[in-house]
Amino acid sequence: MPTIADRILQPDHSNLEFSFSPFLKSQFAFGLDSNRPVCRLYLQGHCPLGNSCPEKHHTSQDRSNTRQNTIVCKHWLKALCKKGDACEFLHEYNLRRMPECYFFAKHGFCTSGEECLYRHIDPDSRHGICPWYEMGFCQLGPDCRQKHIRKAICQLYLTGFCPRGKECEEAHPKHVTPPFPPQKRGTAGVSDMQAPRTNDIHVSRNVADVECFACGKRGHFANRCPEREAWKSAG
């Protein structure tokens, strides 16, 4: 028998029922048992209750072919999803499986702050493995914005050959110099403006191949055509 203090500090909410609870159960399947049976009418092809049916409208085979139970449906959060149980996303309020916040991913901050319902993923976690660390040494150390994954060096690879190849779980040091220096945390990586562009390289033309559109002769441009200067002086 719980004491009065236990009832105050740890109240039992299992018997509470709100006036809007039936609406949440029928429209959003909120509060329904996840182990409830599959609707037999749905398995036969059609259930007249539709989304209002208290039983499941999907089978285990349907779940294996979809992305259900991985990411929460963003349309369901706004009560706009029309797929119901046929939706390939999760219809459940789960903070660990919320979709990514578009505003935070684009601008690096979110105006909603901690009250935002979507996930705020650290930009540094998106970067791949540091090629300098993979080669053997990274001068930035823990300040590097890329991942430093510590692995034991493969002794077979050091002796000259590893039969496991790419499937080897130990490190195979690479001796190819990366194209760009390592980047510090919090700084912008190598962007398209910093990367070399082949389209912007100006290739000089051979003057002997240039044809003047003023006189039709080769070997000079029209702005330096000698006959054009002669025409001006004659006119």
Image (spheres, rainbow, N blue to C red):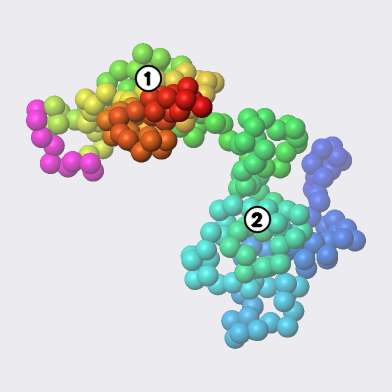
Establish if 205 lies above or below 63: above
Q: Residue at x 76, y 73 (%)?
A: 52
Crowd class of label 2 (few under 14; some 14 to 19; many from 20; radius 10 Å): many
Numbered disc in front, either 2 or 1? 1
Can residue 37 be seen from the camera position used here? no
Tell me the CA gap for discs 2 and 1.
Answer: 40 Å
Residue carrying label 1: 181
Q: Residue 81: x percent and y percent? A: 71, 62
Q: Nearer the viewer, residue 14 or 28?
A: 28
What is the magenta range?
Answer: 159-167
Q: Amino acid at mark 1?
A: Pro
User: Residue 94's spot in the image, x, y percent?
Assistant: 66, 49
Quarter of the figure with residue 228: top left
Find out whether residue 165 is within the magenta segment. yes
The amino acid type, in three-letter code, at marker 2 is: Cys
Examine the rendered structure and indicate whether residue 147 appears above or below residue 13.
Answer: above
Q: Residue at x 85, y 56 (%)?
A: 16
- The residue positioned farthest toward the front in the image shown: 234
Residue 147: percent from left, percent from top: 41, 28
Q: Is residue 77 left or right of residue 45?
A: right
Res. 73 mark? 2
| Residue 24 seen from this side | yes
Examine the image and state in which quarter residue 164 appears: top left
In this rendering, position of residue 95 left or right of residue 197: right
Q: Quadrant of residue 107?
A: top right
The local crowd at label 1, few if under 14, some if 14 to 19, many if 20 or more residues have their Cα within 10 Å, is some
| Residue closer to the observer: 90 or 109 | 109
Residue 94's place in the image compared with 81, above or below, is above
